Image (tube, rainbow, N blue to C red):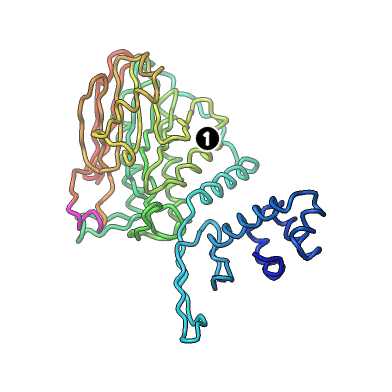
Amino acid sequence: MTPTEISQQAAALREFATPREAAYLEAIELTGTIGKAARSLGVTRGSVQVCLRHLAKRAALRGWSPTHDMTHTVPEPFRLKGTSTYYDRDGKPRGQWVKSEIDRDRLLLHVQETVEALRETMPRLDPRPAPRHTFEALCNQYTLTDAHIGMLAWHQEGGADWDLRIAEQTLVGAFEAMVAAAPAAGTAIVAQLGDWLHFDSLLPVTPQSGHVVDADNRYAKVVRVANRILRRIIDLALEKHSRVIVVLAEGNHDLSASVWMRDTYAMLYEREPRVEFASSPLPYYALQHGKTMLGYHHGHLRGPKMGLGLLMAAQFPAIWGATTKRYVHTGHLHSVSEQDEPGVRLIQHPTLAARDAYAARGGWLSERQAAAITYHAEFGEVARTIITPEMLV
C-alpha cells in the first residue's frame, strides 16, 4: 500500500492492527511518508513496510481490501472464506457475495479469554460429606459418550425422538441407574468421551466441515441444559464415591466447548478435594488405578484400527510401564466394538442418543446403551452394568 492508501484506510485498518501497527499508521498519517514515519519512531523503513504487509493480509482475511473491491468485513471469530464480485461492462462492481467461516484458532482464543475472565467471578462449590464405606480397591467407570445434547431427532426418521428434554431425562436417568447398580467403589470415573454437545457455536453447524445439523433450540439454552446435566452427574458420583475423576474429552462436534467445560468445571469444583479433572491439551487421556491403566480418546483422530493402542503406550509410557491391565475407551462411531491388542484392550462405546436424519439416511444403526464398568486395582475389569433407554421408562 502507498502512504496515500494507508492514510485513506487508516481508520478501517486500526480495527485489525496490533498496538505496534497502530503506532505506524498514526506516524504515517502525521508525517505523510513511510520513511519519515520510520525515522520519527526510530525504526527502519523495512520494518514498517513488513508490518504493514502483515496488517494488509490480516485485514484481507477478515474481508477488507478496497484495492480489490473488498469492503465487507466479517466479525470475530469468523474469517473470510471467499468473496465473489460481479462487474458490469464498464468494470464497475455491481454485486458481491461474502462467505465466512469460523476461525478455529481465534475461537479457541476467545474461549480461553472468557475462561480467564470467569476465574475472577465464578462461585466455587463447597465440599460435600464423603460416603462412610467404600471399597478402595475398586474403581467404577461411568461411560457417557456422544450425548449430542442439542440434537433434534424424529422417530419417523430414526426410530426415536431426541431433544433437550429427552436428553436430560435419559442421561440423568441412565447415570442414576448405573450408580445404583454399581458397587460402592472408592473411586469413580465420569468418562464423558466427547460430542457432549451436538454443535459448537451460535450456528448449528459442525466445527470442522461446516455441515448443518438438526438442532433443538438456541445455543445458550443447549449450554444451560448440558451444564445442568453434567452438574447433576458429578454430584451423584460424589454421593457414592470417596474420589471422583472427571474426563471431559474433546469431540469432533464440540472442539471448543470441551475447552471451556474442562476449565470452568475445574474452577467450579476447586474447593472440593474429592473431585479431579483429567486435563490435557491433547485429546488423549490416561489414568492409573493400581496396576490398571484406563485410557480415553473420542475416536475422531485415532480409532481402534488406527494404532490407538500403540499411540497410548507411546503417549503415556510411565503409566503403561507401571500397569499390567490396560483398557482404552473411545466413542465417535455410536456402535459397540471390542478388540484385544498386545497388552491392551480397546473398547468402543455406543451412544444413548437417538439417530438424527443424517445417521438414519446413512443407514447407521446400533443398540443404544451406556456402561458402568468396575475395575479392580490389581485384576482389571471385574464387573459391567449395561443401561438402555428402554430400561428407564
Mark 1 residue element: helix
What residue is rendered at 40% in x and 23% in y?
316
Q: Main secondary structure of the magenta part?
A: helix
Residue kind at label 1, given as amino acid type: Ala
Name the quadrant of the N terminus: bottom right
Q: In this view, does 57 lie above or below 44?
A: below
Q: Is residue 26 magenta?
A: no
Q: In this view, does 261 lie above or below 149?
A: above
Q: Where is residue 214 in the image (x, y as percent from the top left)?
A: 33, 60
Label 1 Cα crowd, 10 Å radius (few <14 / some 14-19 / many 20+): some
Q: Disc 1 designates what residue?
A: 266
What residue is rendered at 27% in x and 14% in y?
379
Q: Does the magenta stretch include residue 359?
A: yes
Q: Between 152 and 134, which is closer to the camera in this rendering?
A: 152
Q: Is residue 222 above or below residue 382?
A: below
Residues in magenta, as a range: 357-363
Residue 135 is left or right of residue 74, and the answer is left
Q: Position of residue 143 (x, y in %)?
A: 32, 34
Q: In this view, does 9 lie above or below 318?
A: below
Q: Position of residue 323 (x, y in %)?
A: 34, 15
Q: How many labels does the image show?
A: 1
Residue 195 is left or right of residue 261, and the answer is left
Residue 368 is left or right of residue 3, and the answer is left
* Corner quadrant of residue 343: top left
Q: Position of residue 294 (x, y in %)?
A: 34, 25
